[in-house]
Each structure stands twice: as structure tokens, then as C-alpha cells.
């Protein structure tokens, strides 16, 4: 995919694209049909390679047809029933509803995006751990409210970045991406009728989940916390990267000069510039991610009846956009951290030039009568060590 309005969009490849969503919907129909056959409900002859019945041009036709029904499932099912023979056409989609297919296909697409994010986050934790360890004792000026504050180290700065990334990465590891197979009103009525029992209907749903690599779950229909949890997890990643990018962009200003991106971007008219493009694009994503998640929360709050009239529909493109932007930002963050350059001498010089950064120390020693420590660095070594220990624990199970 390409998107001139969102530089870097190609880094998300086909994730959450129209083509991926269509393939996921077909995969849902395929897995459900296989579950019906596996349970002895539909005959073995009903099994068919549904993806093989799609042709070039179907994507656009299904997308245009969705305007009539409000979702793309009706057109897809109608097309497949026309092209497949009996008994495939007869048993296709039986026991499902359009919401089952849309929601579960979205979860399949999210599953793939989350897998990519987990890999990127593991790269970032490794890169940050190396930086924190290398620069655990490198002197640096700490700043609060834009002003010189106290002596610190580069290791502590990087440790804060590492903690932010871990705060986002750890919940993502546990993120539950559930199946949806409740039938027309989320009661499993059709599946119970087909299978002959409640247990049989639940088994069909579980088989669908296993086949698609999703978490088994009872129908959630208009309880949309599954969607908002995913949105929140994505935004937490973007928040962490935005924080890092803000520090790097600020620290790369020539008057500070402590950080630099490897291979900074060029200017169209000013050849002397090396712009912190990765940081700029990460800040862009951080600024826009939270409002997208807010839309998901608004849609969840507006959920009504057993299928929402508009709130459900508002989720699809919103989640797609948020997920793709997050994957792009993940790639940018990994690239930024892998090539981040730290000017040790400049950091030391900025600290040395700062005025009265030990004034707090004097107040403390006057109060206690204790001798002043040589560097006034507090517990920086322990802070770095604690973050590195946490990172090591996370990486034991990371991809």
C-alpha cells in the first residue's frame, strides 16, 4: 500500500489492508465451514477452497456492493454461493451472521499486526538495554520544565525510555484477541440448532478460534471492550515512542547537540540541515493515535441493542488506521534506536556549563550536616540495574 498523506505507510506492508481484510473474511468462512464438516453437521463434500473462487476485481466489486448492505459480508457470501457448487453453497455461512465475520476477520488482521509489533518491541528493548548499559555512568544534565535541573546520566535517560517501552510491551504480550461467533443476535441460536446442543455450538466457536489462531470466547456482540482494549494497547505503544522521539528531537537541536539520528533527513532548500525525521514521524503518530482510540471508546459507549446502528461500523476503519499507523511507528522507533548517536562530550559539556545545578545538594547538606557526595547522582546505578533486570525478564519470552 502507498499513502502520500502518511509517509512510511508502506512499512506496514499488507497488514490491515483491504486485501488482508478480504482474505481474513474468507478465512473465517473457510474455518467455519470446516468446523461444520468436522462436527458432522455438513457433509465432507461441502469442503472447498473458498479463496480459489475469488478473482481479480472482486475486491472492488465487494467494496462497492457494501454500500448497499452497510458491510462487505453479504456481497462476499452471495458471490461465493454463486461460484461454488452444492453442497458447498448450501452450507456456506450457515450459523454465522455478518457481524461474526467482520469482527472475527478484524481480529485476524489485528493478530497479525500485534505479532509484528511484538517483534519490533523486542528489538527496541534490546537496543535500549545496550544503550543504558553502555552509558550508565555517562554524565548528563537533567532538565525539568525546559530548564537545567540536576546532574544525571545518559543511562538514566535511556532507562526511562526503556521503562516506557516495557510498559507498552508487557500488556501487549498478554493481549487477548478473541473470536466472535454468536449468530444473528449473539445467542448462538443457529449454531445450537445446527449442532443439536449448546455444547456443540460452543465447540463450533472454539474450533473456529483454534483454526484462526484466536482466543476462544463467548459472543461479545455489543460489548466492545475487546476492541477498546486493543486500541488502548496500540496507543500505549505510540505514547512510549512519542516520549522518546520528543527527547531525541529536543536533544538533537544544534544548541544542545546531545543526540543525533543516524542518516537524518535532508531539506529541499537548506543543504546544511540533518532533520530528525524518525522522531518527527513518531511524534506525528503519537499526536494522532489517542484520538483514534477515543473514537473506539465513543463507539463502545454508543453500542446499543444486539447490533449497533453506526457505532459498530465506525470501528472498522478507525481500528485499521490505528493499527497500521502503530506498525509504521514501530518500524520507525526500531530504526531510530538502532542508529541513535549520543555525543558524550557534548552531554558532559552541557552539564558543566549549567548554572547552580548543585544548589539543591547544598540545601540538603546544610540541613543534615552530612558531607556532600562527589556527584549528587542519587540512586542512578540502582535505577539502571532495575530497568535492565526487568528488560531481561521480558526478553526471555520475547520473539
Image (cartoon, rainbow, N blue to C red):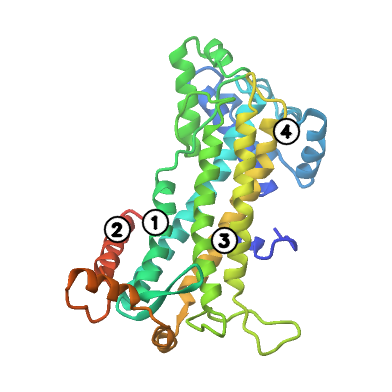
Front in this rendered view, residue 271 or 253: 253
Answer with left or right where residue 133 lies relative to residue 189.
left
Residue at the front extreme, as displayed: 366
- Circles 2 and 1: CB atoms closer than 8 Å: yes
Label 1, label 4: how far apart the Cα atoms are: 41 Å
Q: Residues within 10 Å of mark 4 (few under 14, many from 20)?
A: many
> Which of labels 4 and 3 is toward the front?
3
Q: Earlier in the sequence, mark 2 or mark 3?
A: 3
Residue 228, located in which quarter of the rendered image?
top right
**Whole-number angstrom distance, CA of label 2 to CA of label 1:** 8 Å
Residue that carries the numbered disc 1 in the rendered image: 166
Near-viewer residue (191 or 6): 6
| Disc 2: which residue | 390
Mark 2 secondary-structure assignment: helix
Crowding around mark 2 (Cα neighbors within 10 Å: few <14, some 14 to 19, many 20+) is: some
Residue 188 in view in this figure: yes
> What residue is disc 4 on?
76
Q: CA distance from mark 1 to mark 3?
A: 16 Å
Which residue carries the number 3 mark? 329
Vertical comparison of 73 with 335: above or below: above
Tell me the residue at 54%/62% (across/down). 242
Cα separation, mark 4 vs mark 3, equals 33 Å
Task: Choose mark 1 or mark 3, whichever is in front.
Answer: 1
Amino acid at each position: 500500500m502507498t499513502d502520500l498523506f502518511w509517509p512510511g505507510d508502506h512499512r506496514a506492508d499488507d497488514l490491515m489492508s483491504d486485501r488482508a481484510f478480504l482474505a481474513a473474511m474468507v478465512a473465517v468462512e473457510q474455518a467455519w465451514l470446516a468446523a461444520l464438516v468436522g462436527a458432522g453437521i455438513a457433509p465432507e463434500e461441502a469442503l472447498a477452497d473458498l479463496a480459489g473462487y475469488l478473482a481479480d476485481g472482486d475486491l472492488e466489486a465487494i467494496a462497492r456492493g457494501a454500500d448497499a448492505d452497510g458491510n462487505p459480508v453479504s456481497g462476499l457470501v452471495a458471490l461465493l454461493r454463486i461460484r461454488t457448487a452444492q453442497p458447498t453453497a448450501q452450507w456456506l455461512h450457515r450459523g454465522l451472521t455478518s457481524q461474526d465475520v467482520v469482527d472475527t476477520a478484524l481480529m485476524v488482521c489485528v493478530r497479525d499486526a500485534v505479532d509484528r509489533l511484538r517483534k519490533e518491541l523486542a528489538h527496541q528493548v534490546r537496543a535500549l538495554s545496550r544503550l543504558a548499559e553502555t552509558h550508565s555512568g555517562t554524565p548528563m544534565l537533567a532538565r525539568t520544565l525546559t530548564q537545567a535541573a540536576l546532574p544525571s546520566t545518559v543511562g538514566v535517560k535511556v532507562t526511562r525510555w526503556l521503562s516506557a517501552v516495557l510498559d507498552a510491551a508487557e500488556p501487549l504480550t498478554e493481549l487477548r484477541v478473541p473470536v466472535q461467533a454468536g449468530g444473528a443476535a449473539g445467542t448462538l441460536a443457529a449454531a445450537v440448532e445446527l449442532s443439536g446442543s449448546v455444547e456443540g455450538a460452543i465447540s463450533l466457536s472454539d474450533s473456529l478460534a483454534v483454526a484462526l489462531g484466536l482466543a476462544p470466547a463467548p459472543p461479545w456482540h455489543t460489548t466492545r471492550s475487546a476492541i477498546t482494549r486493543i486500541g488502548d494497547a496500540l496507543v500505549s505503544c505510540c505514547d512510549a515512542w512519542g516520549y522518546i522521539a520528543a527527547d531525541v528531537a529536543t536533544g538533537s537541536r544544534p544548541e544542545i547537540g546531545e543526540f543525533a539520528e543516524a542518516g537524518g533527513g535532508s531539506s529541499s532548500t537548506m543543504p546544511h540541515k540533518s532533520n530528525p525525521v524518525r522522531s518527527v514521524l513518531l511524534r506525528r503518530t503519537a499526536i494522532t493515535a489517542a484520538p483514534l482510540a477515543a473514537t473506539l471508546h465513543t463507539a463502545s459507549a454508543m453500542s446499543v441493542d444486539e447490533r449497533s446502528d453506526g457505532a459498530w461500523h465506525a470501528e472498522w476503519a478507525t481500528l485499521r488506521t490505528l493499527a497500521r499507523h502503530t506498525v509504521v511507528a514501530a518500524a520507525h522507533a526500531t530504526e531510530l534506536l538502532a542508529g541513535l548517536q549520543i555525543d558524550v562530550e557534548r552531554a558532559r559539556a552541557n552539564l558543566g556549563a549549567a548554572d547552580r545545578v548543585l544548589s539543591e545538594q547544598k540545601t540538603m547538606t546544610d540541613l543534615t550536616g552530612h558531607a556532600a557526595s562527589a556527584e549528587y547522582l542519587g540512586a542512578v546505578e540502582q535505577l539502571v540495574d532495575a530497568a535492565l533486570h526487568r528488560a531481561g525478564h521480558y526478553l526471555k519470552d520475547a520473539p
